[in-house]
Amino acid sequence: MDKNKFRFWILVSIVMISGFSQGMLLPLIAIIFENDGVSSSLNGLNATALYIGILLISPFMEQPLRRFGYKSVIIMGGLIVIVSLALFPLWKSFWFWFILRLFIGIGDHALHFATQTWITSFSSAKKRGRNISLYGLFFGLGFATGPLLTPLVKINETLPFVVSSLLCLIGWIFIFMLDNDYPEQDIESNSFKETIQRFSQAWKYGWVAFLPPLSYGFLESSLNGSFPVYGLRIGLEVASVSILLTAFAIGGIVFQLPLGMLSDKFGRRNILMGILFLGFVAFLAASFFEQSIVLLTTFIFIAGMLVGSTFSMGISYMTDLMPKNLLPTGNLLSGVAFSVGSLAGPILGGTFIQFFENISFFTIISIMLLSIFFIVTFFGKQPTIQESEPVRLSK
């Protein structure tokens, strides 16, 4: 097998297992806390720990990547996730679990930052949409199967944590089969001033492209962290909540690759505008059919088909806009945008459920998607930066 292909399939397989652990963790802990009588706002606060970890580590990720390479960062991130998952059964405490989720956020961000930067760096422009969509597809496959472990909580609360930790360990071992590689080193990365300059340059080129990852973070965390609480309160069974979350994830899986290929042909911005608007319509329709599990599942599945690709589409769009030597910074800011959306999801979702009992939970998601649609429509631009044009920082 070609070296790049072998490396690509190892990386996306690791991402799939990471997605599995994330897909399991959010609804599992939300349901455990809801059954223990923890308020929806505190439940949402605990879910934000994952994304606080992402934000805390983000300013310090680029220099280790440039110094130690992609493989080293992935190994360290995976190890942090495995150990943290294994420690959950040790002590059932709100703040202990908060700290563990914070460390999982740190480890997951290291893993995803390194893998997606590595993939975007060796992918040609003609296959970039396809490769990043496959990255998103494999993450989605893992994320879709994760919530299916949630009913195991009825057997034993520790069982899902143990299974997830063992699967992550298996995936982590495979990374040792790869040769290490490093991002382009034509800019300095030592001083705080240069870090701020890179962030400023990357923001200038790709700020619109950071909004789709932000929207996906909001969707993922609010659906998996807050919706289980809302679902139980409107009379849905735990199994029904798991099916709905899985339907959304599977919807994203079904259209991940086709949308990526369409974006290669018709442009990332055009496809993004279409899926954001139609996603708004699908969630709005879901808000009117919450009492019918069949119709609700159908609309959630359609919504997943449309907006389940917003993260990978945003990464591809950002890569089109960004000079290649700023790709690590662009990927880092995409991760920050994702984490900001993910932080906002459980907080706003939990608060919305607590104070707006007579309004559908899907309303807040619809408003978010429509807002980003308008921003991409009026402020987005077609790619103008070529891979061969590096940006050099002023001294």
Image: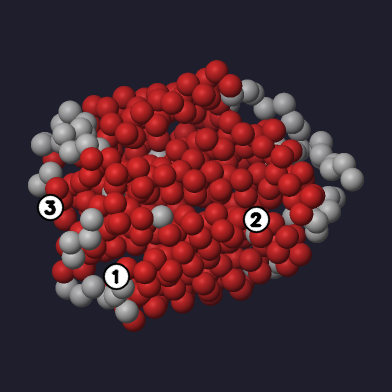
State which quadrant residue 147 falls in: bottom left
Residue tagged 3: 237
Residue 322: give x, y in percent of width and height. 70, 37
Residue furthest to the top in view is 378
Whether residue 342 is visible, yes or no, is: yes
Secondary element at tag 1: helix
Residue tagged 2: 59
Q: Which mark is residue 160?
A: 1
**Mark 2 vs mark 3: which is more N-terminal?**
2
Mark 1 surroundings: few (<14), some (14-19) or many (≥20) residues within 10 A: many
Amino acid type for the residue under numbered disc 2: Pro
Which of label 2 and label 3 is nearer to you?
2
How many tags in the picture?
Answer: 3
Vertical side of 40 occupied by 310: above or below: above
Q: CA distance from mark 2 to mark 1?
A: 32 Å
Secondary element at tag 2: helix
Amino acid type for the residue under numbered disc 3: Glu
Residue 109: give x, y in percent of width and height. 54, 58
